[in-house]
Amino acid sequence: MSYPSLDLERELLKTHRLVIGIDEVGRGALAGPVAVGAFGLNGEGLDSMPADLRDSKLVTEKRRAPLALEVAKWGQPSVGYAEVEVIETKGINFALQKAALSALENFDLTEAIVLLDGSHNWLGDIGIEVRVIVKADRDCGSVSGGAISAKVERDSLMTKLAQGFPAYGWEGNKGYSSSSHIAALRQIG
């Protein structure tokens, strides 16, 4: 099992006031919004990372919500959304940027740096340095914090939305592709 470290954050906090780790959730879903989690870490949090924090895809559903509470005590999480209509009309990269900018509104970006999970900068020019890091959700604690926060919030939203659309099973599949979700789409649309 791979756990993230704060090695990069520790180094960056020597020259920056705040490191903000960013990851997206819901990009591959068939239903629901895309969510972007941003997690702000300053020097005070370097010695208190939750011990079992890791990439949200590697944390069991039962453990995610309690871990998100630990993450919220550890630093500053923020989640932004872009609705399905934005994804469909403007495209996924525009939607991701919109969601990220919404999440970033909760931070003072003075002397901040962003660590962005992925292989390209879908965030664009936001006036501060953005470092794109493949597998940052696995390797960087701040990005794992953003990922867990976004995953828990989006999953909770999809569970609530499922009440209005029970045939799709969103309370279980969270809008992602599953055999029952595909069958419901074929039958109902």
Image (cartoon, grey):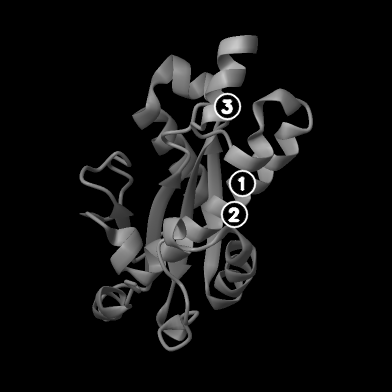
Specify which label sits upstream in the sequence, 3 or 1: 1
Please give the count of numbered marks on the rendered protein: 3
What secondary structure is found at the residue carrying circle 3?
A: helix
Residue 61: percent from left, percent from top: 58, 58
Quarter of the image where the N terminus is located? bottom left
- Quarter of the figure with residue 113: bottom left
Tell me the kind of residue under disc 3.
His
For disc 2, the marked residue is 152
Q: Residue at x 78, y 27 (%)?
A: 164
Q: Residues within 10 Å of mark 1 (few under 14, many from 20)?
A: many
The kind of residue tagged 1 is Asp
Classify mark 2: residues with Cα within 10 Å, few (<14), some (14-19) or many (20+): many
Q: Residue at x 64, y 69 (%)?
A: 66
Whether tag 1 and tag 2 are in contact, CB under 8 A, the answer is yes
Is the residue 170 above or below the residue 42 in the image?
Answer: above
Image disc number at residue 181: 3
